[in-house]
């Protein structure tokens, strides 16, 4: 895990200047949304010439780390490899259209959503019915007259993917089986697609998305590491998932890449990750949560992403059904605080603090259950 993080950190810092210069040469300037927030032009006019598509640097460093440090025979390695390339290409396509046509919104929203759902359904289907899908052990403890009786139940891939866990609750929250697994597949697709788009919406200020991703990924990486050890998972009374250490390695690579990217993305940003990075990184968080059966934990430790996405949904619904009335001055939520006069650095720092608090609460849930 540490080697993966160090690898991506050093690669992104070392190659950052070269990639930034190349992006400047390609004129991949940041497009500013003005349709429903005209004041953004004034607030972010200095960002117009800052190159985007910096996510290429993040994803390339992560893929190098994957090849170096992950077990290439693990099903998780294949899932993350395919997902990173797929979502990276999708986001890059969107960024390219915005760059080529300066007034373009990029790839049509419905088309982008459909392509995300296709990947999410594919990942969920493979985890449930794939020929090399992982297995797990659900371990329970019962204390009787100072004696601890441990019981271990081996779960098939279908049983694993039909079991859901809630932070702070001991044991499974609920289980799905048979035909209801199709409902679970839809839920998994919702988590992966929703996470991808929520991170994309959060990527609007210098360093905001990268910093919050680091904290959420750190929590999931810790759970993946603990779930990979039979004795530790038994002691902590959490699910043991065979091979989940590979998930921890890739999330560590993600953390290192985002920290290295922050070297150049911190205020004032020299480069933005664009949809190339945000769609892929959000999707990876969602896929990791689904693999670990920690979808609700992601909603907790990634609460900033949830709030950002909800602010956009509420704004759209209010505008549509309340005679064009708005809930926020501008959505996503970080722009609302900008409009209220908060400096960009203050907005980012306070969102980071909230993300850190939520991450700590997520870690606390390991023992309080």
Image: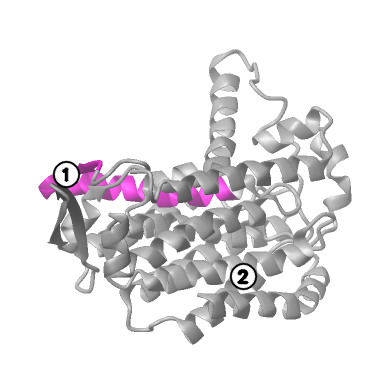
**Quarter of the figure with the C terminus:** top left
Image: 131 above or below 219: below
Q: Nearer the viewer, residue 357 or 264?
A: 357
SS class, disc 2:
helix
Horizontal side, residue 3 vs residue 222: left or right? right
* Spot occupied by residue 260 in the image (x, y as percentages of width and height): 69, 69
Magenta span contains residue 258: no
Q: Which residues are magenta?
A: 173-199
Give how far apart the Cα atoms at labels 1 and 2 are.
38 Å
Horizontal side, residue 4 vs residue 75: left or right? right
Q: Nearer the viewer, residue 149 or 9?
A: 149
Residue at point 76%, 60% (across, down): 265
* Spot occupied by residue 84 in the image (x, y as percentages of width and height): 49, 68
| Residue behind mark 2 | 256
In this view of the protein, can residue 177 be seen by the observer?
Answer: yes
Q: Nearer the viewer, residue 218 or 79?
A: 218
| Residue behind mark 1 | 180
Magenta span contains residue 195: yes
In this view of the protein, can residue 28 be seen by the observer?
Answer: no
Residue at point 82%, 59% (across, down): 50
């Amino acid at each position: 895990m540490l080697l993966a993080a160090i690898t991506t950190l050093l690669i992104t810092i070392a190659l950052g200047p070269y990639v930034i210069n190349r992006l400047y040469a390609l004129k991949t300037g940041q497009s500013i949304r003005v349709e429903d927030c005209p004041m953004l032009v004034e607030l972010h006019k200095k960002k117009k010439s800052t190159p985007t598509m910096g996510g290429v640097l993040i994803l390339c460093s992560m893929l190098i780390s994957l090849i170096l440090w992950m077990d290439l025979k693990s099903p998780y390695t294949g899932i993350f490899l395919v997902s990173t390339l797929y979502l990276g290409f999708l986001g890059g396509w969107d960024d390219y259209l915005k760059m080529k046509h300066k007034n373009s919104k990029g790839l049509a929203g419905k088309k982008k959503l459909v392509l995300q759902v296709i990947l999410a359904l594919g990942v969920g289907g493979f985890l449930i019915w794939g020929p090399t899908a992982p297995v797990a052990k659900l371990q329970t403890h019962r204390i009787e007259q100072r004696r601890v009786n441990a019981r271990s139940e081996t779960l098939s891939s279908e049983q694993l993917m039909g079991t859901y866990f809630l932070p702070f609750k001991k044991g499974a929250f609920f289980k799905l089986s048979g035909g209801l697994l199709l409902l679970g597949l839809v839920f998994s697709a919702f988590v992966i697609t929703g996470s991808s788009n929520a991170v994309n919406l959060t990527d609007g200020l210098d360093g905001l998305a990268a910093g919050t991703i680091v904290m959420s990924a750190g929590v999931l990486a810790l759970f993946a590491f603990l779930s990979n050890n039979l004795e530790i998972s038994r002691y902590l009374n959490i699910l043991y998932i065979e091979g989940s250490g590979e998930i921890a390695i890739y999330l560590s690579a993600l953390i290192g890449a985002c920290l290295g990217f922050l070297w150049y993305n911190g205020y004032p940003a020299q480069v933005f990750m664009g949809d190339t990075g945000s769609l892929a990184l959000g999707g990876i968080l969602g896929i990791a949560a689904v693999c670990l059966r920690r979808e609700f934990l992601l909603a907790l430790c990634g609460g900033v992403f949830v709030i950002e996405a909800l602010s956009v949904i509420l704004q759209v619904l209010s505008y549509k059904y309340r005679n064009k009335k708005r809930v926020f001055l501008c959505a996503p939520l970080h722009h609302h605080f900008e409009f209220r006069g908060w400096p960009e650095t203050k907005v980012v720092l306070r969102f980071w603090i909230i993300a850190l608090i939520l991450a700590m609460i997520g870690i606390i849930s390991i023992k309080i259950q």
